[in-house]
Amino acid sequence: MRVLIIDDERSIRTSTSVAIQAAGHQAETADGGQVGVLKLQEDTYDLVFLDLRLGDEDGLEVLEQIKRQFSKLPVVVFTAYASVASAVAAMQRGAFDYLEKPFTPEHLRQIMARVEKQRKLESKIDDLEQQINLQNPTIELHSSDTRMTAALDILFRAAPTQAAILLLGESGTGKSVLAREVHLRSNCKEGPFVTVSCPSLSRELLESELFGHMKGAFTGAVRDTWGKVAAAESGTLFLDEIGELPLEIQPKLLRLLQERQYERVGENKIRMANTRIIAATNKDLKECVRKGTFREDLYYRLDVISVTIPPLRERPRDLENLAGSFLQFFGRQLGRTRLSFSEGAMRKLNAHPWRGNLRELRNTIERAAILALTDEIGEEFLPDASADGQMTEVVVGADITLDQLEEVHIRRILERAASLDAAAKTLGIDPATLYRKRKRMNL
């Protein structure tokens, strides 16, 4: 690492430099705060050791100046005037660690080892994010459709505020992608983005997943758990498919939205939350309110900023652009950068109903790119649709796979079921299994 030592005592600068170089790192020095800041502006460093007493300069003010300009640069503060107050003040201003004079070379090595460990972890995270980006195509955040453009405009204008946002639209329209984009454009973008899939767990487990629980609160609670609300502190909590949120939990979510308060399961202590709520659903929440499966007061509290994402089949120009973007992405992955659609393939893309929206389109284009024998993808590699835009009829005994038959059956049960629980009961499976099948089938 390249280390800068800022200290007004020459002996400290010299001894610290020797210890750092002996540990295999490079060391440079500055005899004052402003000299140190100038060096940081002129060159790149991995770590700074900063004295809190710099003659007429205030080391804490220098620390603040460094963190303002180089927020990710770790700064270790040391001083001969050690106290709990100065340690707390330094850590509150962003110091990585605190070292009391006189210190030994071993103390320096331990701190530098921790800094190196953190740098390696950050590097691994960056590598993983790059790998994820390479495996997933970027969704374009501009549109040729007027309704979609208006929806994006509302979302991005609301992003810097703390207002709750409700995203409405069919499954696969990109609601989770837009929720993350709102987070990245918000004032809490440095905080975590935490997702909770409301229909993926039973009521008891979902409550614990959201709010946390105390050890012994229920069977299987072998240790304290903080929950997703705590995990999203100073960030964004995204509640996916909130229309499936059990009625018993809805008052607790309302309290979280209105009063920023919650309690862990099995605990009587009131805790405060500082998190932004974004929710999404493919259900008609007004109809759910009318049926009594969703609280009216919770609906209006969530409906501060409400945006409906139009389905892909109603955005023909976006459909063509997105299909082309997906094709380029998968073409690069496969080393086939000249892939294109034939005229017949484009007509077929436009005729398809795309009930799974972006998710279905992505899967379809990936499959076509893999199976195409030439650089021009023909219509034979794309799904069929009837003249009225409906999928070809699937009946028992037809030449179809069990997976196709299951998908049609589940789709029809979902269309007439009052809730996800009711659909799962009819199908003879638990709601979590049905949730996974819906995700896999783009329903």
Image (spheres, rainbow, N blue to C red):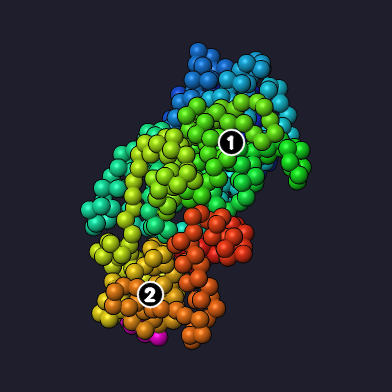
Residue 391's disc is 2
Rate crowding at label 1 as few (under 14), some (14 to 19) or many (20 or more) other CA atoms within 10 Å.
Answer: many
- Start-end of magenta stretch: 373-378
Mark 1, residue position = 230
| Magenta-span inclusion, residue 98 | no
Residue beneath the point at 56% across and 24% down: 92
Of helix, strand and loop, which one carries label 1?
A: helix
Residue beneath the point at 46% across and 61% down: 416
User: Which sits in the foreground, 404 or 423?
Assistant: 423
Numbered-mark total: 2
- The image position of residue 398, as x and y in percent, is 48, 85
Residue type highlighted by circle 2: Met
User: Which sits in the foreground, 264 or 296?
Assistant: 296
Q: Quadrant of residue 110?
A: top right
Residue beneath the point at 62% across and 64% down: 428
List the single residue furthest toward the front. Answer: 291
- The image position of residue 329, as x and y in percent, is 39, 67
List the single residue furthest toward the top. Answer: 56
Residue 298's disc is none
Residue beneath the point at 37% across and 36% down: 304
